[in-house]
Image (cartoon, rainbow, N blue to C red):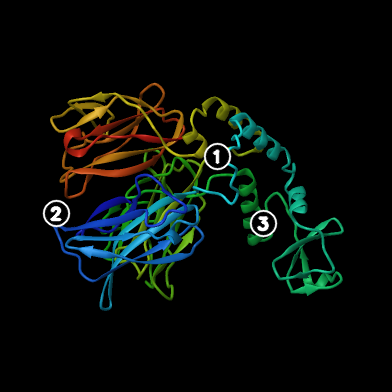
């Protein structure tokens, strides 16, 4: 069994954590997820009944009974939690009478470890060239236009079939959606014509279905969770991007979204009569661009998923959320990675894949270890990217990450960050000019916090601060190939 533990102080807001590594489909009781509870850095006993809601990628929630001892609470994931590949969320709660408290919120990825087809052990797996040829052949089958694609995907009308509202068919060269249940001969009153235009403004469901179909065909990336940090007791003014002191709301710090083409977040709905908070977008200099206001006069305080129009030059976003969240709800934000915009660029991607694929891990999309050189006696300043002499930290050399779209590493945590930026992570361009950094984090105790970091295309190198290896263990950097 693989155990993953997180620390949580009762004086700090619960934030979303990420599993360092992956979990795999078809496992059973293979992962223990636990939390160590503290109050102002001192171990705090856990009381009440421990349980967890495991939310799979298909939207199904699996209820899991947990355990506790002293200041620890944990759950062991059953097989039903692993069966669906994709993003999985684990929310650990303590229940005492009518009181329910969220202790830990964890997000991870379930990777497929088996398929419906099983080959004979003697069968030789196809070469990468064969696989690429199959990809190219499949790509050649995609119709040139959306209208042709739709008429290919929608079956011809069958008078002997029964249709439910929302189903599609083609009839006399055109495409239709059924608005009434139908069986028998063609009846124009039971259908409405579907027009696929350049703007796709006719119908939201039609647009979403087309987008989903296209993404499945092109195998584009699914949205992935974005890590965020809390700035206490403030809301974000949607009209200016400024911080507004608040006893009701809190907000995220600046979230780097330069690696994403769009974001989807949990928009705040409140019963307040007047609202001037929401989310705000900022450019690379953290100068305000535009914002989206929270929804006021809702019947209940709650969150709803929302995808805003993201400005083309947006580099950061800050989001307002409830200081005391509605029962059973947490704030989340997801991003969709920037991808080639046309089918024509797929050929370039395929040629790049031929040149870059060097191991089975790359083919399966699993992270690979990135080598680095250990530099003792220095830490990295997150505000300047410079090395600083240090009696506490060591660091890496310039680590080349041009072949990667995301890295997993560890962020230094310290009891106080006052005047201290030397235990940080910094990113650089191809000329090793400093671009931006991620400072060390206050976390009550000295140690590390797991990070999964996406970054914009201009990033070429990273340098990371490292704690004493003999005390805190080996420092490992892994990455996902582009």
Q: Residue at x 74, y 62 (%)?
A: 168
Q: Residues within 10 Å of mark 1 (few under 14, many from 20)?
A: few
Mark number displayed over residue 21: none
Badge 1 element = loop
Badge 3 element = loop
Q: Residues within 10 Å of mark 2 (few under 14, many from 20)?
A: some
Mark number displayed over residue 339: 1
Q: Nearer the viewer, mark 1 or mark 2?
A: 2
**Could you say where residue 217 lies in the image, as x and y percent from the top left?**
65, 46
Q: CA distance from mark 1 to mark 3?
A: 23 Å
Q: Residue at x 50, y 27 (%)?
A: 358
Whether residue 344 sits left or right of residue 389 in the image: it is right
Disc 1 and disc 2 in contact, CB within 8 angstroms = no
Q: Quadrant of residue 329?
A: bottom left
Q: CA distance from mark 2 to mark 3?
A: 54 Å
Q: CA distance from mark 1 to mark 2?
A: 43 Å
Q: In the orientation shown, which residue stands out farthest toward the bottom? A: 97
Mark number displayed over residue 41: 2
**Could you say where residue 120 lies in the image, as x and y percent from the top left?**
59, 42
Q: Quadrant of residue 256?
A: top left
Q: Nearer the viewer, mark 1 or mark 3?
A: 1
Counting residues from the N terminus, which is met first, the one under dot 1 or under dot 2?
2
**Could you say where residue 290 lies in the image, as x and y percent from the top left?**
45, 50
Whether residue 145 sits left or right of residue 243 in the image: it is right
Badge 2 element = loop
Residue 293 visible in the shown view: no
Counting residues from the N terminus, which is met first, the one under dot 2 or under dot 3?
2
Q: Residue at x 15, y 33 (%)?
A: 392
Counting residues from the N terminus, which is met first, the one under dot 1 or under dot 3?
3
Q: In the orientation shown, which residue stands out farthest toward the top? A: 431
* Residue of label 3: 201
């Amino acid at each position: 069994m693989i155990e993953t533990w997180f620390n949580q102080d009762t004086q700090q807001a619960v934030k979303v954590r990420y599993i360092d590594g992956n979990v795999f489909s078809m496992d059973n009781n293979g992962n223990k997820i636990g939390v160590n509870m503290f109050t102002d850095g001192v171990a705090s006993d856990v009381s009440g009944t421990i349980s967890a809601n495991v939310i799979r990628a298909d939207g199904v929630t699996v209820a899991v009974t947990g355990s506790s001892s002293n200041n620890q609470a944990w759950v062991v994931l059953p097989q039903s939690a692993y069966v669906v590949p994709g993003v999985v969320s684990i929310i650990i709660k303590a229940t005492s009478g009518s009181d329910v408290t969220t202790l830990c919120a964890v997000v991870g990825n379930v990777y497929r470890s088996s398929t419906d087809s099983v080959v004979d052990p003697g069968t030789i797996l196809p070469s990468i060239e064969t696989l690429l040829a199959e990809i190219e052949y499949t790509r050649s089958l995609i119709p040139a236009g959306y209208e042709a694609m739709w008429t290919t995907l929608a079956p011809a009308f069958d008078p002997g079939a029964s249709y439910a509202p929302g189903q599609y068919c083609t009839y006399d060269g055109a495409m239709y959606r059924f608005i009434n249940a139908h069986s028998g001969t063609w009846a124009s009153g039971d259908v409405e014509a579907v027009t696929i235009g350049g703007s796709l403004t006719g119908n939201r469901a039609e647009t979403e279905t087309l987008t989903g179909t296209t993404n499945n065909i092109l195998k584009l990336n699914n949205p992935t969770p974005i890590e965020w940090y809390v700035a206490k007791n403030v809301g974000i003014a949607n009209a200016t991007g400024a911080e507004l002191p608040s006893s009701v709301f809190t907000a995220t710090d600046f979230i780097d979204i330069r690696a994403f083409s769009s974001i989807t977040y949990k928009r705040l709905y409140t019963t307040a009569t007047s609202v001037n908070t929401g989310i705000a977008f900022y450019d690379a200099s953290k100068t305000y661009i535009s914002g989206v206001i929270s929804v006021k006069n809702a019947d209940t305080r709650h969150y709803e998923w929302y995808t805003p129009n993201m400005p083309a030059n947006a580099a950061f976003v800050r989001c307002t959320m409830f200081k005391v969240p509605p029962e059973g709800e947490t704030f989340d934000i997801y991003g969709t990675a920037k991808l080639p915009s046309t089918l024509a660029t797929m050929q370039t991607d395929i040629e790049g894949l031929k040149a870059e694929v060097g191991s089975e891990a790359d083919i399966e999309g699993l992270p690979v270890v990135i080598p680095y050189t250990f530099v003792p006696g220095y830490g990295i300043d997150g505000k300047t990217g410079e090395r600083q002499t240090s009696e506490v930290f060591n660091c890496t050399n310039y680590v080349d990450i041009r072949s990667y779209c995301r890295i997993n590493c560890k962020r230094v945590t310290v009891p106080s960050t006052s005047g201290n930026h030397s235990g940080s992570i910094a990113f650089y361009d191809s000329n090793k000019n400093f671009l931006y950094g991620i400072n060390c984090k206050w976390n009550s105790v000295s140690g590390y916090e797991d990070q999964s970091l996406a970054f914009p295309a201009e990033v070429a190198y990273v340098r990371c601060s490292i704690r004493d290896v003999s005390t805190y263990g080996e420092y490992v950097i892994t990455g996902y190939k582009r």
